[in-house]
Amino acid sequence: MRRVLFYVQHLLGIGHLRRAAVLARALVAGGFDVLLVSGGAPAASLDLGRARFHQLPPLRAVDETLRDLCRLDGMPADDAFCTARTGELLALVRAERPDILIIEQFPFGRTRLRFELLPLLEVAKTLSPSPVIVSSVRDVVRRASPERVAEAVSMVRASFDAVLIHADPALVEFARSFAGWNAISERAHFTGFVAEADFVRSPVSNAGADEVVVSVGGGAVGLPLLEAAIAARPLTPLASHLWRLLVGPNLRATERSRLAAREGIIIESARTDFTTLLANATLSISQAGYNTVVETLNCADRAVLVPFGTVRETEQSDRAKVLADRGMVAVVTPGTLSPDTLADAVNRAMVGPSLRSFPACDTNGARKTAALLRHLVEARRRG
């Protein structure tokens, strides 16, 4: 059985890890023996199916800028910590001797992890036989300087056999966010979007019917949107509808306590029937993370996206702009969120077209990833 070592690092939310788990399950179903190696905070209720799992000493982002890393307790990730973690990772790849090494985001992101990823690549290339080395990336990557783009191109050409882009090119063009596309396109493969589970297109319950569903993914940076939604409700044409706010597991207890439930508003934890809520709701209001957007495009009727963004983190705003430019969603531009701007976006979404009037996007990314990797391994075996 072909072995896969799949490295993933989530820094703030849990979306990266959730998507990696979906891919790991699909690879196992496709006949691979998968070891998922996570460098982020442990996550509860992660469905890995029959994939194996290894937790590295965890790192997280110091704050929402994602500029610096620290240990889970907030202590600096000093040289001793990084050296020990790197040693653990290199020992894993030597012991596993994988047929395929998948590194999520790098070299298009996660550059703060160079201290362990560059040695990982070098060790992998010394194995005999050497693994097929793959970069696994989303539909959009963070915009970068010309120097950073050139570095990523150089790394791809020197160390990676393939770049798997988990997107539908008919909807999102990778070249819009990565300026070096022409230099790597011959190694790139579009898989379609990776979805957590089968989408609910014919709901078996009426949960969420006629509601406004407000969601913030894991919730680590979701408090401003939740507070704005509560204040915006009476300013919208949907003021008579029930608004259901899903807070996410990473919203701190002190922040959740600031959200006061009132008539017409329900505040609760994220739910496992989220896609059913979307399918029945009058409107979805959410951030613009990859997983939530894929679910929204395939289940919701109308949507408002409120992307999280900073000077460095442009991925959510770029994804939202692609969809807004196509007339599919209404967007609140990062840095402008207020009750008034959110209410305006709600008004625009309600007079715009339904998402269901647009062609369905390709969400077979997990299955296609397994098929592509089988092809790459067989091509390597044939020499």
Image (spheres, helix red, strand yellow):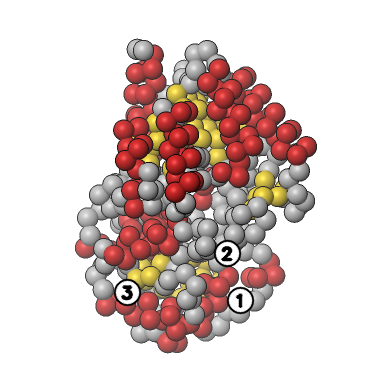
- Closest to the camera, between mark 2 and mark 1, is 2
**Mark 2 — residue?**
221
Distance, label 2 to label 1, CA atoms, is 14 Å
> Of the residues shown, which amino acid type is indicated by label 3?
Ala
Is 14 placed above or below 121 here?
below
- Place residue 42 in its image quadrant: top right
**Mark 3 — residue?**
349
Percent position (x, y) of residue 51?
Answer: 53, 31
Quarter of the picture holding the C terminus: top left
**Mark 1 — residue?**
259
Distance, label 2 to label 3, CA atoms, is 23 Å
Left-right relation of 142 to 115:
left
Looking at the image, can residue 241 be seen? yes
Disc 2 vs disc 1: Cβ atoms closer than 8 Å?
no
Is 17 placed above or below 88 here?
below
Is 235 placed above or below 33 here?
below
